[in-house]
Amino acid sequence: MHEPYLTAPPDAPSQDDAVWIERSWDEPECFGAVFDAHYAEIHRYASRRLGPYAADDVAAETFALAFRRRRRFDLGHRSARPWLYGIATNIVSRHRRDEVRLLRAVDRLNPLAEPPRGHEDEVAAKVSAQHVKGTLARAVAALPAAQRDVLLLVALAGLSYDEVAQALDVPFGTVSSRLNRARGKLRKALGEKNPLLDEEEA
């Protein structure tokens, strides 16, 4: 049996997420428009952080929680994207050990070795293919959780500083501070170079 948020209204026109969320208070099926607009992106983010095997559960739980909490959404925001990323990040936080273990597995992965066969190695290979390799993976794994969240919301989700602040419910300055500290640690670990996250310095 499907949850009511899984099906968008037929022929739903494009509107702000806030419109659909407010409508969903009385017409739960309207939340399907938010689901359709953002599910693939949230699933991709979860997969990049925890691997494809966990992504289905994280994405499903994200939208289940968002649906149950939809009356708490600030209707002053047009997009639900940062809000959804915040929920997803909180869910990912329950899997910190899995994320660190995944990153360390990537660090150990030898690109010249035989193709990976185990579950962990398969996940590691997928992350490696997404350019999170070796020393960088080790450095990201070593970051404090709060700094890693900010870093990956910017690097993987492509959120702006303002959107990260909204997602994590922290001040803009906190986002900037955490990101600067994280980048500094990565630059140090990578010999003062960070090919993934410092495009502005390229």
Image: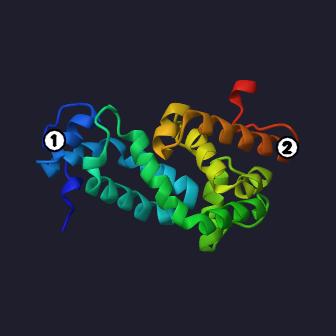
**Three-letter amino acid code at the position of disc 1:** Arg
**Three-letter amino acid code at the position of disc 2:** Lys
Label 1: which residue? 23
Whether residue 135 is visible, yes or no, is: yes
Whether residue 51 is visible, yes or no, is: no
Task: Return the x and y of residue 129 as percentages of the image width and height.
Answer: 64, 51
Residue 156 versus residue 153: which sits nearer the camera? Answer: 153
**In which image quadrant can residue 65 be found?**
bottom left
Asked if residue 37 lies left or right of residue 47, the reply is left
Q: CA distance from mark 2 to mark 1?
A: 49 Å
Q: Residue at left 37%, top 61%?
A: 61
Task: Return the x and y of residue 180 as percentages of the image width and height.
Answer: 71, 37
Q: Residue at left 72%, top 53%?
A: 143
Q: Residue at left 22%, top 54%?
A: 5
Q: Is residue 198 above or below residue 49?
A: above
Task: Return the x and y of residue 194 as percentages of the image width and height.
Answer: 77, 38
Task: Return the x and y of residue 151 as percentages of the image width and height.
Answer: 63, 44
Q: Is residue 53 above or below residue 81?
A: below
Residue 188, label in figure:
2
Asked if residue 14 lies left or right of residue 63, the reply is left
Task: Single out the residue that lies furthest toward the right.
Answer: 191
Asked if residue 65 lies left or right of residue 154, the reply is left
Residue 73, label in figure:
none
Label 1's element?
Answer: helix
**In which image quadrant can residue 120 be found?**
bottom right
Categorize mark 2 by other alpha carbons within 10 Å: few (<14), some (14-19), many (20+). few
The N terminus - image quarter: bottom left
Categorize mark 1 by other alpha carbons within 10 Å: few (<14), some (14-19), many (20+). some
Q: Is residue 125 above or below residue 201?
A: below
